Image (spheres, rainbow, N blue to C red):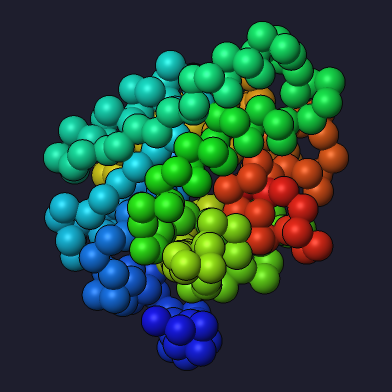
Amino acid sequence: MSTLDIAQLQAELSGKNPRIILKKALELFDNIAISFSGAEDVVLIDLAVKIRPDIQVFCLDTGRLHPETYRFIDKVRKHYQIDIEVLTPDRVALDAFVKAKGLFSFYEDGHHECCAIRKVEPLRRKLAQMDAWITGQRKDQSLDTRQDVPEVQLDGVFSTEGHPLFKFNPLLNWSSAKVWQHIEAYQVPFNELHERGLISIGCEPCTRPVLPNQHERAGRWWWEEATKKECGLHVGNVRGGLESE
């Protein structure tokens, strides 16, 4: 599939229902997987298993997740009777990083170095084996970095000259309220931390509950500027090529 086809495909899928986008993605690619971490991604799994019961699913285990998140991963695995591949950081790189900078250096010099080792590198290894991936990105998750994200794109971060990687964002135009309507209507499993005021859930040291009327991303990396609340998984979202999640 060429970049010209991507433009045509985006024109075809722009503004379409997530089911239509998922169905098209799964028709086009056999070697495709859902990246799973939060509520949006389980909605994607809930929709995708009705189209392809053996859909590939993977998640990132940074080693710093909440206990509730680990239980959530297993709950989803059992609920949908699917395999979930758990990706982990490179042990040598992580050991060297922790030895040199300790376990909480991100509070002093920002989260990007830690995220690069614990999240981006394992994801890069996985996506090098894939032709396409599916994410739960939504525009309203970040007014700064996700407004221009399309329904389908050639991944500008993880593609290489010899290996184009395609990225689908079926829930792009859904609101958080729409996601939770689906979760409640279809009894979709969710992380119990959501019941304690945590909306956007990442690693335990970097996540806290949000206050009333705060944006959902305010609880992530709260000690940093709002424009830096991305971790490296979706670098192309940030204007100018800065790091992102």
In the rendering, at what x and y percent does residue 160 appear?
53, 63
Q: Quadrant of residue 158?
A: bottom right
Q: In which quarter of the image is residue 115?
A: top right
In the rendering, at what x and y percent does residue 91 appear?
49, 20
Q: In this view, does 88 lie above or below 184?
A: above
Q: Quadrant of residue 82?
A: top left
Q: In this view, does 52 lie above or below 77?
A: below
Q: Which residue is drawn at 52% across and 62% down?
A: 159
Q: Is residue 10 above or below residue 77?
A: below
Q: Which residue is drawn at 75% across and 59% down?
A: 241
Q: Residue at x 66, y 9 (%)?
A: 99
Q: Residue at x 49, y 28 (%)?
A: 89
Q: Please identify the quadrant where the N terminus is shown.
A: bottom left
Residue 175 shows in the view = no
In the rendering, at what x and y percent does residue 121 appear?
54, 38
Residue 220 relative to residue 168: left or right:
right
Residue 137 relative to residue 236: left or right:
left
In this view, the residue in front, 220 or 8, is 8
In this view, the residue in front, 178 or 102, is 102
Residue 79 relative to residue 155: left or right:
left
Residue 26 relative to residue 38: left or right:
left
In this view, the residue in front, 66 or 196, is 66
In the rendering, at what x and y percent does residue 233 appear?
58, 48
Residue 35 shows in the view = yes
